[in-house]
């Protein structure tokens, strides 16, 4: 498991702490998108495009990294 993790970190070019920060940022963005979608399901006037906009950002590696760097300079 350690060897596989080390290999993955080399592949993405990150240290363990950098990777953890990015993974937690990604998880937070997923949680935010899902919360917005749940609220939108209850009140359609709220978060009309927020959840789908967030999902599009998550699917675009360049936009995702830019958003991460903006929050974590």
Image (cartoon, grey):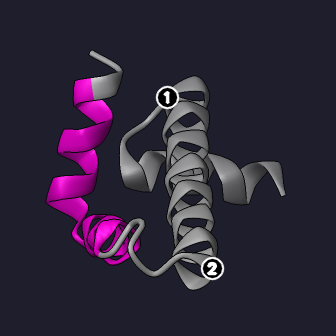
Q: Nearer the viewer, residue 39 or 64?
A: 39
Tell me the magenta residue range: 49-70
Q: What is the chief secondary structure element of the magenta stretch?
A: helix
**Considering only vertical position in the picture, is 34 above or below 28?**
below
| x, y percent for residue 15 | 51, 29
**Considering only vertical position in the picture, is 70 above or below 58?**
above
The residue most toward the top is 73
Q: Bin the neighbour count of mark 2 within 10 Å (Cα to Cα): few under 14, some 14-19, many 20 and up.
A: few
Q: Is 63 inside the magenta-drawn segment?
A: yes
| x, y percent for residue 42 | 63, 79
Quarter containing the N terminus: bottom right
Mark 2 or mark 1, earlier in chain: 1
The label on residue 18 is: 1
Q: How many marks?
A: 2
| x, y percent for residue 67 | 25, 41
Q: Nearer the viewer, residue 39 or 54?
A: 39
- Give the side of residue 71 with respect to residue 24, left or right: left
Question: What residue is rendered at 34% in x and 64% in y?
Answer: 54
| x, y percent for residue 7 | 57, 54
Question: What residue is rendered at 26% in x and 70% in y?
Answer: 53
Quarter containing the C terminus: top left
- Give the side of residue 15 with respect to residue 46, left or right: right
Question: What residue is rendered at 60% in x and 69% in y?
Answer: 39
Q: Is 24 inside the magenta-drawn segment?
A: no
Residue of label 2: 42
- Give the side of residue 41 with respect to residue 44, left or right: right
């Amino acid at each position: 498991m350690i060897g596989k993790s080390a290999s993955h970190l080399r592949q993405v070019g990150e240290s363990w702490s950098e990777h953890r920060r990015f993974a937690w940022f990604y998880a937070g963005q997923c949680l935010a998108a899902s919360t917005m979608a749940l609220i939108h399901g209850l009140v359609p006037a709220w978060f009309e495009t927020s959840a789908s906009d967030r999902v599009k950002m998550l699917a675009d590696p360049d936009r995702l990294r830019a958003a991460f760097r903006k929050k974590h300079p």
